[in-house]
Amino acid sequence: TGQGGSFFPLLFFLAEEVLNKGISMLVDHGDFQLITGPSGTQVPSCILSTNDIVVSKKGTKCSLDSFMNLFKGYSVVSG
């Protein structure tokens, strides 16, 4: 079979869940500021798919630093 074989979908799902939970935790702790939608519409913090990651946040340095630290930590533990 191809790269990752039959385990690839499961591995992707697990990685997506870890990143989603990490970003949600940053939002909950106030370390990651989301953009505000029109008329108070809630904007999702992230959308993850097999080929893309879309993140909606304010461009503050604190938010960006928190986001980069999340990915650095993720890369350390995921190899």
Image (cartoon, grey):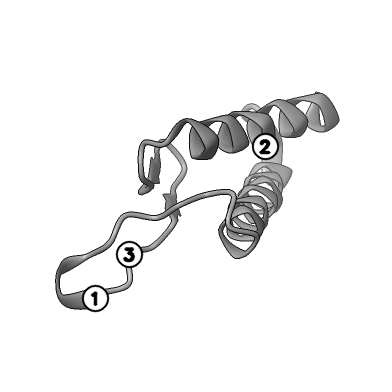
Q: Is residue 43 above or below residue 10?
A: below
Q: Alpha-carbon neighbours of circle 2 within 10 Å: few (<14), some, or many (≥20)?
A: some
Q: Which mark is residue 43?
A: 3
Mark 3 and mark 1 in contact? Answer it, CB < 8 Å: no
Judged left or right of residue 73, residue 53 is left
Q: Nearer the viewer, residue 8 or 31?
A: 31
At horizontal 40% and vertical 55% (from top left) the residue drawn is 34
Residue ID for mark 2: 70
Q: Which mark is residue 40?
A: 1
Q: CA distance from mark 3 to mark 2?
A: 20 Å
At horizontal 56% and vertical 58% (from top left) the residue drawn is 27
Q: CA distance from mark 3 to mark 1?
A: 9 Å
Residue 52, can we see it?
yes
Q: Which mark is residue 62?
A: none
Mark 3 and mark 2 in contact? Answer it, CB < 8 Å: no
Amino acid type shown at disc 1:
Gly
Mark 1 and mark 2 in contact? Answer it, CB < 8 Å: no
Q: Position of residue 10 (x, y in %)?
A: 69, 52
Does dot 2 land on a helix, a strand or a loop?
helix
Does dot 1 land on a helix, a strand or a loop?
helix
